[in-house]
Amino acid sequence: MLFFLGNTAFAQSDIPTDYFSSPLDIPLILSGSFGELRSNHFHSGFDIKTQQKEGFPVYAPADGYVNRIKVAHYGYGKALYIQHPNGYSTVYAHLQNFAGSIQNYVKDNQYKKETFELELFPDASLLPVSKGDVIGYTGNTGSSGGPHLHFEIRDSASRPMNPMLFGIEIPDSKKPIINSVFAYPIDANSHVDQSQNPVKLRLKLQKDGSYITEKIAGFGKIGFGVSTNDQLDGASNKNGVYQIRSVFNGVEKFNILFEKFSFDETRYLNRFIDYEYFVKNKSRVQKLFRQSNNPLSIIKNEEDNGYVILEDGFSATYTIEVTDFKKNTVIITIPMEGKNSEILEKKDLKETEDYIYADQATSITKGKFGIYIPSNSLYEDTFLDIQVQGDTLKLHEDVIPLHKNITITMDASNYKAADFEKLYIGRLNYKGQPYYNTTYRKGDKLSTNTRTFGTYTLAMDTIAPSIKPLNFENGKWISKNSTLQLKIEDDLSGIGSYRATVNGKFILMEYNYKKDVLTYNFNDNVVIDSENNLKVIVVDNVGNSATFEATFFRK
């Protein structure tokens, strides 16, 4: 225990701890922490709870200027980027709205370009901010699962850093939670408890809060993995931890520190975790060893890539230390005995006719389908199970991660020209329904790009979207309304685009895809006449179009 605590890494001394103030004036309770393991990426900042409400003012935590603004239906939604004179930048996402001159600048550009979604890069002199200025209001825009503020601090190379390093205080008096521990036989000669497959170890909680596993009997090259979360004060969310270290007979084998990473490396999370176990069990096991094609910079120290070699007749102890930023620590001890026993459970491996070399580009033709896999799309050489039945392609199953986009092409020459434009390639969801993948057309072929294995099929959408008014009726007075709202839906290929005008003039409508609602705010002052003719055109992803027209009156 003393060895662990004496060697724990802490925040770098050159990071300013009193430069940035809190972006909110409410207690900081997190629903998401820095480095937290997410789908295909590490979380790049804080998700700060906003009491299940929107509209809290967001304050500039230091002087600077707005150097980027992005407004999107998905992802970060309404997002603001501020450059600070000390070289760091801060990011604010899922905003309900921007504030003051920033909001005016965005709205002017949206009307000028006649689009809701846009990305702007203002000059340094255009939108300066001072520490404490209100720059926006918290919201739930983009791919947010509920009202909160996503907040980031990035270094001069735009790499996100842990905001806790900068002195932003988050109360945390709880130890990390240990969910499971696994042992992984690595090569053909390795085994654990007479198995060549990953073995889940039984954890026994000790009185001091540490864990010990039952002694394992193993042989050869072995790696370990741990599923762990941290729980901060005031919330029950499963957050990420700060550091994971392992020691083998007194020698540090692996040290992971969640302080900083680059966006270029974040998708390698899928190499870092046991991806198949996650897909099947919804629990992310972090592997405490570095496999090939894993360049993650969060790995700060390693000895023999984190692997241990267990020889016959050799006894050893492997220890895992899990720590949060407040130094709350849990230790797991794994006693080991080297024993070259008979292997009773062979490695799960299904051999097929399609063996893919990870470092080579591969083209495969199956029935109507062509599959192109660029080099280094896979992390390691593997067999793929690829089958075709009519217009459906079973492209393995989603238990192997893809790092790059692969291309699926389909020959649709047997379809009539009138139907061709309504076709798309979709990935079947768990209900067996095709989920639209962006589909390209060239000649009589359709193609799509994907980074997920699974079952893909050719689908057709000939049904136009539906448009319904929510807070007004045709021919009625709506002087008391502050907004116009319409519900737009498309059950097959999904909404592709929309455009609205009043008396022939473009009006800005915000699309909330989570509620299928379009909203226009009368504060934009485009509608100034008493009698107004509204026209809304909605197009789905294969070009089916619907038009809604109505007349309303305002004083």
Image: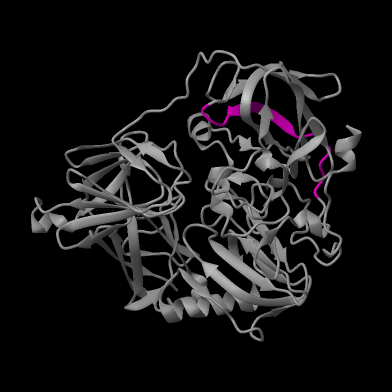
* Horizontal relation, residue 171 to residue 537: left or right: right
The spot of residue 430 in percent (x, y) is: 37, 34
Furthest residue toward front: 312
Colouring of the image: one colour
Residue under the image location 43 percent in, 54 percent down:
404
Furthest residue toward bottom: 125
Q: Nearer the viewer, residue 520 or 432?
A: 432
The C terminus sits in image quarter:
bottom left
Task: Magenta stretch: give its range.
Answer: 170-188
Give above or below for 268 relative to 198.
Answer: below
* Horizontal relation, residue 12 to residue 437: left or right: right
Residue under the image location 75 percent in, 57 percent down:
163
Specify the quadrant of the image occupied by residue 440. bottom left
* Horizontal relation, residue 436 to residue 27: left or right: left
Residue 525 shows in this picture? no
Residue under the image location 57 percent in, 72 percent down:
69
